[in-house]
Image (cartoon, coloured by chain):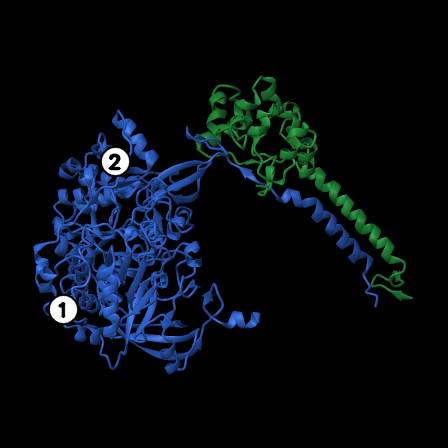
Amino acid sequence: MRFGRTGIPISGTSRWVPAAGLLVVGAVVAGIFLSRAVALAAPTQPLPYSHEVHAEAGVQCLFCHTGALRSDVAGLPSVQKCIGCHALISTEEESIQVLTGYWERAEPIPWVRVQSQPDFVFFSHQPHLGAGLPCETCHGDVARMTIARPVVRMDMGWCLECHLEQPQEKVARLADCLACHK
Amino acid sequence: MTKSISRRQFFRIAGGTAAATGISPKLRRILSEPFVRPPEDVLPGRATWYASTCRQCPAGCGIIVRVINGRAKKIEGNPLHPLNRGKLCARGQAGLQVLYNPDRLRNAVRQTGGRGSRQFEPLYWDAALDLLAEKIRALSNPGRLAVLAGLMPDHLYRLLSLLLESLGAAPPVIFDLHSALEGRAAAARSSEVFFGAAELPVYDVGRSDVVFSFGANFLETWMSPVAQSVAYGNMRQGAFGGRGLLVQFEPRLSATAASADQWIPLRPGTEGFVALALGRIIVEERLGHVGSHRPHAALYQDVDVTEMAAASRVPIESLRRLARLFADAEHPVAIPGGSLAGQQNGAASMLAVHALNHVVAQVGRVGGVFLSSPGPTAMLRQTARVDSFAQVQDLIERMKAGEVDLLLAVGGNPVFELPATAGFAAAIERVPYVVSFGSFVDETAVRADLILPEHTYLESWGYQVPEPGADRPAVSGQQPVVRSLYDTQASADVLLGLASRLGGRPSEALPWPDEISFLEETVRDLHGSSLGAYDADTPAGFFALWRQYGGWWSERELPREPVVAEAVIQPLPIVAPQFVGDERTYPFHLHPYPSVALSDGRGANLPWLQETPDPMTTARWSTWVELNPEVARSLGIGDDDIVRVISPHGELEAPVVVYPGIHPDVVAIPVGQGHTDYGRFARRRGSNPLDLVAPVAAADGGALAWGATRVRLEVTGRRQTLARLESLDGAGRESLG
């Protein structure tokens, strides 16, 4: 029998290896769940913009994210667009004063991206909206969120789930590698 | 065999793994910054292409720049532009690194700690312009104002000339090393003697079947390399009947010579002798198919082929064979290049080469030599002309004598680009106030009191009539592709602001409120021309199309035939080259040559260009000395051994590249490195061969004779491995076996 540094008896590999293996697996599983939780959390934004408030006021998604119909990216509204309304609306709110500060300093607002795709994925909003998909399908019910957060991890399996369910004549094209990895 | 791990260690590792797995997505925090005020024509995520003009060299190629979300991402050649036809060189591609360079000056500055202190105090532009206006007003007489400039776009040159004229000051003295290396001044001068027009001829290489290039590295840096490369491709692919043939005559095998069918190594300064001998043989033996050679006989009456062959050490049989090859061709052309102009007998050599075109009647004929037709662009043609080296020396003398109170350095970098012993660095110390207009703190700007950084060319307006031109009248238009990144100003706007502050004659001469209104008014002259590739009903519509096309050009080809001047009937001059340094003490000729990537050193602050390997040696990021293998063997040295190169005017040390493509009498060093300032990528890297060059001009008031210096070599016994793209010849292949 040998003794470890802490005085706990260690008997070679026989007793420790299964326990150690179990702990490593446990740690990795915990890590995956933890990472999932972090990935789907709302990021800290430079000002507490609420989608819910704007949606309740009847503002459509495409009013601010104008690129979605015509471009690859939906785009974020310019500070000029925000101030277009907030020069008059809720000007006494603290968050609006932060916004006005950006406008007056002519500084862009450093928003933290909520959704992103890696470089090797060529995603475009335009064909998805062209196919009649509503925004909620991928982005969740943003109208009920304050700070937007991702609802799904947009990985390849998730994309394919939908692409493979399309009508037979379209599947071959939609499941082609080059559809997204150009 | 068991390795003991304590439980504590184990938990530490397991916990760390879990934390690392969990934290990783959080580290990917991407910021997305939308516009404060969006430009009207920008759709996020979609590229907008703007047509503009490249300013990385004076050629004036058309470019299109891909811009996404207000950021310039990629530069390509403008496919509509008649000069470069959609192609672009490496230096043009690297323009993005000029725009995004971390060493750019971000606002106007005053050097407060004295010259060379590099202590800069930011200034508001209004204050800076007031300061400069005050300095001009305080001059006791306008003759005490001097402007030293590099080649600049035409609109800036025109405004600068107008301002100086209205002040009663002398016109700018124009010098830059790139122009000196390509022999721009000498080419314009020989064209004036030969064709009576001081402009650069256009060689119709694309439709030629035999091209004799005398030291013109026309596929690399000489004149308009992209246009010439397109033409070379046409010549080789036989677009106009059969595969064309290229023979290159020069001391060092350049990349152009490597693309040639034959390279004839020559001793520096003997190119003209070869051309004279070829001409004499053609006339004497009545070669070719131009009918009578009687009118040409006078040209060569003093030429003795045997003497010329002896002086150039090219065997007479080779000369005869080459003469027949040239004269028997349908569309031959001979090109006098830059390495001729770097010699003291440059003018005579260039005339001798021009005469070859005359003797085979290829002046103004398909595949021969042309001048570019100005068409309606004539009024825009107020192009900067490179001045003779004597004029530069005269300015240096005036500065030394204390006759200059205010010096404006507009473009160019004379401290780096002039031979060290020309004394410019010392002369600038005698000038009480120096103003630089560069975007970077280069060797000249660091000796300035006030720096007014200009926009980079991707942020500013302008136009340029390309010279040498295309096969038709053309003007390249320049426009901003992005908003200016920093608080810089277009030099044209600085001049206009200055004129309005000075009031009186300057403000009358330069009445425009800003650069754009000046440009709009100038461009209006082209509106309504029947030649144009486009036209519009209104001037505003025309200006919109001007911006979309990136300039204006004729829809169809419009050649202009040069007329051979009377002077050419006289016997051609035979001038022996002269060199600085005694032949016994200094046995080698120094051959500085422009780097394909760095040109005359202006590209040294761009890492993409530093990384671009020299096409012949694959070396980069440094300076090296090219030696013939025989010379290296006689000195007992090899690749990467450091040698000291000593001229009567200076010395430098650099590692050796043993290079078979060089005349044994010649030591070649690429130009471009050896900066002491000019940003983090350029500084303290290699040496500047201009430190060795004697400050002498070609005999007849020509440009700097940069190839007229002799050197000797000393072995230092030290080594330094050069950064190369390829391993040394043979070594890599042996290890593969």
Q: Residue B397 sits in which quadrant? A: bottom left
Q: How crowded is mark 1: few (under 14 residues within 10 Å), some or many (20 or more)?
A: some
Q: Where is residue B374 in the image (x, y as percent from the top left)?
A: 19, 42
Can residue B425 be seen in the rendering of this structure?
Answer: no
Give the residue displayed 76% in from the left and 47% down from the top.
Answer: A28
As displayed, is residue B456 above or below residue B667?
Answer: above
Q: Colour of chain B?
A: blue
Q: Is residue B574 above or below residue B500?
A: below
Q: Where is residue B430 in the image (x, y as percent from the top left)?
A: 21, 60
Q: Note whether residue B651 is visible.
A: yes
Residue A103: mark in rendering:
none
Q: How far apart are marks 2 and 1 (CA)?
A: 47 Å
Q: Residue B519's mark?
A: 2
Residue B321 lies left or right of residue B105; in this view the side is left
Query: Measuring 32% from the left and 34% from the top, which residue is drawn there?
Result: B547
- Kindly identify which chain the residue marked by label 2 belongs to: B
Residue B618, compared with residue A40, is above or below; it is below
Q: Is residue B534 above or below residue B709?
A: above
Please identify, in this view, whether the residue under mark 2 or under mark 1 is nearer the observer: 1
The image position of residue B465, as x and y in percent, is 24, 43
The residue to which callout 1 is attached is: B574
Horizontal side of B418 relative to B75 (left or right) equals left
State the image coordinates of residue A92 (x, y, percent, origin top left): 52, 22
In the picture, the quarter occupied by the C terminus of chain B is bottom right
Which residue lies at the image location 54% right of the left edge and 33% below the top edge? A72
Q: The green chain is which one?
A: A
